[in-house]
Amino acid sequence: MKNLVEKAKEKHILSADEIVSLLSDNSINNSLFKAADEVRENFVGNDIHLRALIEFTNICRCNCLYCGLRAENKNVERYRLSKDEVLDIAQNAVNSRYKTIVLQGGEDLFFSAEYLGEIIKCIKAFDVAVTLSIGERSYDEYKLLKECGAERFLLRIETTDKDLYSKMHPNMSFENRKQCLYNLKQLGYETGTGCLVGLPGQTLESLADDILFFKELDADMIGIGPFIPHPQTPLKQCDSNNFWLSLKVMAITRLLLPDINIPATTAMETLYENGRTIALQSGANVVMPNVTDSIHKKLYEIYPNKASVDYSQLQNVLRSIGRRISKEKGFRCKR
């Protein structure tokens, strides 16, 4: 197993069977995390890139079984932020020294590409990078948003197991999801994707396929999130003991895609004490603090009890592990 870790560290290549072997053997966890941290330091350095997350709408047309914002959940108090509200939050984030604004929302078609484009143009005037996380749109919509100034796009595949994808995402198309990702790459976006770890019915083999898909896509950003059941979804009774497996998937992703950006996800911190710090010492180099106002932040509940962090608190944590907040916008530097 240690030879496989060294192979991944040096050559950044593993087969599906080799990935499954690493995922199934917990005796090599420390070696795996150490190797991922060394590759992270060698390829992307010790700077941590902060992305200011604005959750601008919790209205969603989709019914993903794991998500608290699913359309059929009638217990959610729905909201949409106005353009002025979004810009006020973005301005405050810029004043707090953030270099990237992430606009994240449910799949809410009220926000047309034209309307979002107006918001993006205004945010670009603050001299920051703009990332979108708004789900599936047409090629032409993605093109317009890119022309308005959006540079990055996050669209998690969640799982590359077609059968599992269909079960988790009623009335959605796995092939369309994949096509959206390839459209984003073709249009020149820094393209982010990722997966949920611990979904009921998921196998180590499908997680290995997820990682190999990230490499095939040559994704620029990968978010690995442990599945956390929401009490108002069909998966409310499922197990949530997925932290260490999520960390292993993240570490192997770093070894195979050494120069990409990988967030220490909020879900990791929510599920496990100091999970964010552990992730930053196991291959991650990005943190995405939620800067949405306190009223609406509580209403954007994909999963319950989301962890939070502020700028000064994060500075202290990073200092304690020999890391620092980047002053750059944090684009991928391919090597």
Image: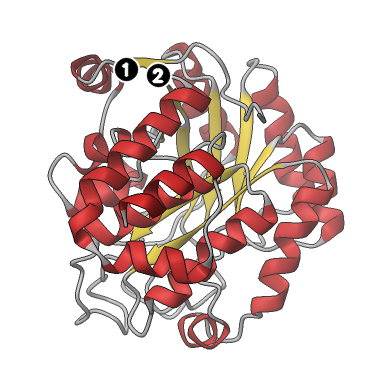
Disc 1 marks a residue whose amino acid type is Arg
Residue farthest to the left, as pictured: 273
Q: SS class of the residue under badge 1?
A: loop
Residue lying at 51% horizontally and 44% vertically, measured from the top left:
81
Q: Residues within 10 Å of mark 1 (few under 14, many from 20)?
A: some
Q: Position of residue 280 (x, y in %)?
A: 31, 34
Disc 2 marks a residue whose amino acid type is Asn
Q: Position of residue 288 (x, y in %)?
A: 41, 35
Residue farthest to the front, as pictured: 3
The quadrant in which the C terminus is found is top right
In which image quadrant can residue 11 be found?
Answer: top right
Residue 238 - label? none
Q: Residues within 10 Å of mark 2 (few under 14, many from 20)?
A: some
Total numbered circles = 2
Q: CA distance from mark 1 to mark 2?
A: 5 Å
For disc 1, the marked residue is 323
Q: Nearer the viewer, residue 61 or 158?
A: 158
Q: Is 263 displayed left or right of 212 in the figure?
A: left
Placement of 10 over or under 317, stated as above or below: below
Residue 298 in view:
no
**Which of the two labelled residues, at mark 1 and mark 2, occupies the earlier sequence position?**
2
Q: Colour scheme of this structure image?
A: secondary structure
In which image quadrant can residue 315 be found?
Answer: top left
For disc 2, the marked residue is 46
Q: Are marks 1 and 2 in contact (CB under 8 Å)?
A: yes
Q: Nearer the viewer, residue 192 or 76?
A: 192
Q: Nearer the viewer, residue 330 or 63?
A: 330
Residue 256 in view:
yes
Q: Position of residue 261 (x, y in %)?
A: 52, 36
Residue lying at 35% horizontally and 75% vertically, measured from the top left:
199
Residue lying at 26% horizontally and 20% vertically, measured from the top left:
318
Q: SS class of the residue under badge 2?
A: loop
